[in-house]
Image: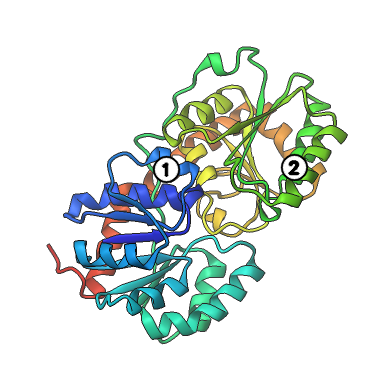
Amino acid sequence: MLFIFSVPSGGVETMNRLRCQALRQIGIEGHLLYLQDGAGRQNITDIPLFITNRDEDLANLLRTHQYAAIVSTCDHIMLQRLRGLGYTGPLLYEAQGLGTKEQAFSTLSNAAYFIRLYANGAITNKTAHLMELYNAYLHDFPRFYIQNIVDTNLFRHQPIPALNPTGQPILAWIGRIERNKNWKLFLQVGSGLARFYPGLSLWMCGDSSIYEADELVQFHNMVHKLNLGNRLTFHSNIPHSSMPFYLSTVGSSGGMLVSTSDNESFGYAASEALSCRCPVLSTDSDGIRSAIIHNVTGKFFSGAVHDAVCHAIELMENKAMRADIIRQGEQHIQTQFSPSRYVADFNNVLIAMQIKTIS
């Protein structure tokens, strides 16, 4: 099978790599095609990888490998291109992310025509707004909802004290400097919490090559305005295999990951943090509900800075609550997002599409 996306970065890069590794369990060899290069390429070591956006290269790829099925993620135009290049096999459209709810609505309303005309089915994860859009625009079209996959073998508690030599609590954030990720809210929460914990460190992890230019200017201005320069560290393009060390260290510091997105289709950062016993405080950004159950596996806050600070203090000071949330969060991710569950769900999609027979 071939999985196609625009650039190897973020949650889709993680998901594509993990599912290719997992699908080997049922005899499926996954290949990855990205239309342009990206920092996430460093994570891909044992999967056939192609980076091109030229029709000539795509046509050669199709002729050479004769794929049994192709999944195009967030790219409905690619469906038309593949058919135009002569591919006649099963095509699946996949929605992941798509930005804010408004952006997702705009994308799916335009994509539905192409999906119906060129694809054989559509898949997405079990996120309320994406399921709602699929049911609205593809109500009589083959559509499938499956949970994403988390590498619970890699993402486990592995703290490295040397990453936090002061031993002070760390407030962490993962994402891109763009509006939907709401980095401003994280800086405001960090500034507010620092009044109670003077030794607090702020860690921001992201892909420094992907950002919205005007947001980046505002980011630097806000860091200066809030006087956060001495406590803020931006970790750029950490290899995915190293992230468990950082997340585990955050959890062991007595701190937490803060997710501030306006909208998420899944929220890999939160799920991987929970798997490493790093508690998560988050806005209620829809898709993240699959990982966080309030006061059970994590905590939600209203989006107000004061509310976030109050919840963060409770999560840091109420040791019994913190221990329960960490334990329940780790167990939840291991149960709901294991590779074996993803393989079973994806296999059922292939069977329903008559792409693969029951083995």
Please state if 143 lies on the left or on the right of 318 as rendered: left
Farthest residue, direction left:
359
- Tell me if I can see residue 308 in this picture: yes
Q: Is residue 155 above or below residue 319?
A: below
The residue indicated by pointer 1 is 41
Tell me what residue is drawn at x 78 percent, y 44 percent: 217
Q: Disc 1 residue type?
A: Arg
The mark found on residue 242 in the picture is none
Q: Residues within 10 Å of mark 2 (few under 14, many from 20)?
A: many
- Viewer-nearest residue: 351 or 242: 242
Residue 254 percent across, percent down from the top left: 62, 24
| Quadrant where the image shows the C terminus | bottom left
Q: Name the quadrant containing residue 258.
A: top right
Please state if 300 lies on the left or on the right of 133 as rendered: right
> Dot 2: what SS?
helix
Residue 197 percent across, percent down from the top left: 77, 23
Farthest residue, direction front:
56
- Viewer-nearest residue: 319 or 354: 354
Residue 291 percent across, percent down from the top left: 51, 49
> Dot 1: what SS?
helix
Tell me what residue is drawn at x 53 percent, y 15 percent: 161
Q: How is the image coloured?
A: rainbow
Q: Is residue 231 above or below residue 9?
A: above
Q: How many marks?
A: 2
- Viewer-nearest residue: 45 or 165: 45
Q: Disc 2 residue type?
A: Ala
- Viewer-nearest residue: 123 or 110: 110
Residue mark closest to the camera, 1 vs 2? 1
Q: Residues within 10 Å of mark 1 (few under 14, many from 20)?
A: some
The mark found on residue 308 in the picture is 2
- Tell me if I can see residue 348 in this picture: no
Tell me what residue is drawn at x 26 percent, y 61 percent: 1
